[in-house]
């Protein structure tokens, strides 16, 4: 896998991943009463965390985007 996620992008994905993963379980928002919305939030959070930790985004590869310097 080619690294294509930069430092700022990586930090944003890490933060967003944690928020999406924890929001359904911590927040009291009515939005998360739906099982489908909770599942989507958890899956999106996991994807954000994985792309942050591996520094590789498959969609960036498809579209030729690279936010890292090296």
Image (spheres, rainbow, N blue to C red):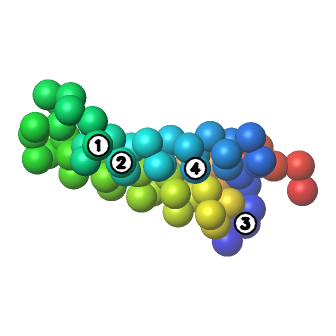
Q: Earlier in the sequence, mark 4 or mark 1?
A: 4
Q: Position of residue 7 (x, y in %)?
A: 77, 47
Relative to residue 36, is residue 6 drawn left or right?
Answer: right
Q: Are marks 2 and 1 in contact (CB under 8 Å)?
A: yes
Q: CA distance from mark 1 to mark 3?
A: 35 Å
68, 15: nearer the viewer: 15
Mark 1 closeness class: few <14, some 14–19, many ≥20 residues within 10 Å: few
User: What's the CA distance linking mark 2 and mark 1?
Assistant: 6 Å
Q: Which residue is mark 1?
A: 26
Crowding near the residue tagged with mark 2, few <14, some 14–19, many ≥20 C-alpha atoms within 10 Å: some
- Residue for badge 2: 22
35 up-or-down from 3: above or below: above
Q: Is residue 12 left or right of residue 20?
A: right
Are the residues at dot 4 and dot 2 in contact (C-beta closer than 8 Å)? no
Name the residue tied to disc 3: 2
Q: Is residue 9 left or right of residue 50?
A: right
Label 4 vs 3, first from the N-terminus: 3
Q: Using the rendered image of the protein, determine whether residue 64 is visible from the camera's viewpoint.
A: no
For marks 1 and 3 on the same chain, the one whose residue lies earlier in the sequence: 3
Q: Quadrant of residue 11?
A: top right
| Quadrant of the rendering where the N terminus is positioned | bottom right
Q: Mark 4 — residue?
A: 14
Q: Which corner quadrant of the image does residue 51 belong to?
A: bottom right
- Tell which residue pokes out farthest to the top in this image: 30
Residue at 50% across, 41% down: 16
Relative height, residue 46 to residue 37 (above, below): below
Tag 4–tag 1 contact (CB < 8 Å): no
């Amino acid at each position: 896998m080619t690294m294509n996620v930069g430092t700022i992008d990586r930090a944003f994905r890490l933060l967003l991943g944690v928020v999406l993963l924890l929001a359904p379980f911590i927040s009291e928002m009515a939005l998360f009463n739906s099982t489908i919305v909770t599942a989507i939030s958890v899956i999106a959070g996991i994807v954000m965390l994985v792309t942050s930790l591996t520094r590789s985004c498959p969609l960036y590869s498809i579209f030729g985007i690279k936010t890292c310097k090296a």
